[in-house]
Amino acid sequence: MRALQGVDLEVHRGECFGLLGPNGAGKSTLIKILTTLLLPTSGRALVVGYDVATEPFQVRKRINLVSGGDSSGYGVLTVRETLHLFSQFYGVPGPVARRREEELMEITGLRDKADARLSGLSTGMKQKLNFARGFMSDPEVIFLDEPTLGLDVEASRDVRAFIARWVRERPERTVLLTTHYMMEADELCGRVAIIDHGRILALDTPSALKRTLPEEAAFEFQVSATGQDLEPLLEITGVRSISHHAHPGTGAVELKVVVQEDDVIGEVLGRLKGLDRSVLHLTKMEPTLETVFIHHVGRGLTDEEAGNGA
Amino acid sequence: MNLAAVYARASVRVKASFRERSWLLGETLFPFLAMSAFVLVYRGLRAPREYEGFVVLGGAMIAYWNNVIWGMASQFFWEREQGQLQLYLITPVSRMSILLGMALGGMAMTTTRAAAILTGGILLFHVSLPLERALPAFGLFLLTLGAAYSLGMILSSLFLLWGREVWHTATILQEPVYLLSGFYFPVSAMGVGIAIVGSILPVTLGLDGIRQVFYGPAAHGLLPVRWIPPIQIALTAIFLFVSAVSLRYMENLGKQEGRLTVRGD
């Protein structure tokens, strides 16, 4: 099985670059290769001009990695000690490390927990600590593999604000970000690559990607959970794609339909009635990164597999 | 940078030793009980008193050997299981410095165990360890540790790639290693051939030499004691070289096969 096929991309220095793709798309495999954890079976990968396969030491001096949902450190250590520990593996001088510890604890809201042991922290705090750890070495390139995964709304917002500021502060700093959250990629990334089944399907700025969409309209429905399968909607002429998932709170089905022109939506409404689906809500969507994603991949990131049917 | 990494990684273990003291009982009383059993067996057999000294010295050495295997060699496996190995592998420091830090950090616990055994042996069983021989014995002990921990670094490369299988193998082989190393008896009792084979483990010759330093011919040494320091030094150099090569090789193999991380795509 090939996790990546013909991936050919260049991330510029100073850029915040996003990698969007569903589970199994190859995002983490690409990150592992670029962070010298995995060897490519063919091709070449350079990070800050150094080959990941033949010059891993040079690469490692200049990078760091934060994998969202993970925690780092040991339960008996405090927050401050954990940050200091990982700074020492990059040769950060003591006074510099201490200054960064204070800054990062402040930014991630861990200042009050500076001397608390990791064993007593909540999962969210451990993830924030893991995030802060990645920046202790002040890398030239930081790889953020779903950094806000599992964080609450406020924490995610703080993390995104920090990432944006961190890149702005020094032009030589570069971020490669993978995320499930379209809004995050849209907000943070200068350019985004959409990846699925190991292939880059599209690569450009978010606004340029949205402009590449054919002249088509996207509509968002909320329909009843009971009724027949929704796949017959694809048989309607003018319907380009559909995606759907159950709303976690209400149980109703959120359905996105991309049509060639607005007039098609009338037929969609009629077919939904025929499928015994009540329409609870209808909105016309402006082009978003998610629309671009669905256009290229054929489904949303949170969509159920075809055949399960809401 | 590598020295800082050694210190940093060692400090984790040292802090853990002082902050979580539940290990104290397990690392002092229980090993002492195991040692006591062998002492009592020798007393029951009316063995020469030196044999009780062999047991005490062997019991102390076991503490360090266990630290080599479980406190250092197997640690990359456990770090991988906890998802932390990748955080070490993406750093520019040498893997050996991280391993050395783990080993040195475990010394606090290990030395406490060894000290408990030595103290208990001397105070309770009146084992004789002539003080005037302590310095050369300690010197030989340090050379033995150097060789043992260097061997541990080779083993850590096996744990890195085949963690769980090697862990099971190491567990199964624990008692055979104790036997082959002569932890509780003079290794020469097994015959020269087997004893020489066992000498690939640095602790075997190290113990043999330390016993000879304290007890002279009564130690039934395998090799003349003056041969042992150069052998240990040579083993250290060889093991360090091999470990550098094997760690690099195993890491590259792990990178090719995607075995270094736990989290999938």
Image (cartoon, rainbow, N blue to C red):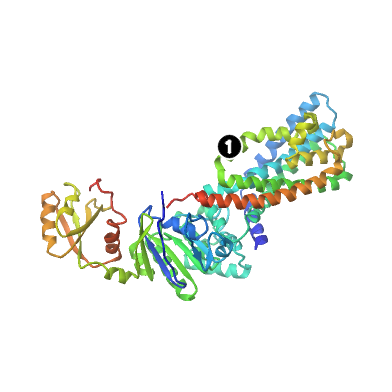
| Residue at 85 percent of width and 41 percent of height | B225
Q: Is residue A145 above or below residue B203?
A: below
Pick the front one: B197 or B66: B197
**What residue would you read off at disc 1?**
B168
> In the rendering, at what x and y percent does residue B213 appear?
86, 41
Residue that protrudes farthest toward the front in the picture: A42
Position of A247 with respect to A69 (left or right) is left
Report whether residue A105 is seen: no
Chain name for mark 1 = B
Quarter location, residue B55? top right
Q: Is residue B214 above or below residue A139?
A: above
Which element is circle 1 on?
Answer: helix
The spot of residue B83 in percent (x, y) is: 51, 51
- Total marks drawn? 1
Q: Amino acid at mark 1?
A: His
Residue drawn 49% across the image and 75% down it: A170
Asked whether residue B65 appears in the rendered view, the answer is yes
Q: Position of residue A244 (x, y in %)?
A: 24, 54
Side of A278 relative to A104 (left or right) = left
Q: In the displayed structure, would residue A224 be above or below residue A52?
A: above
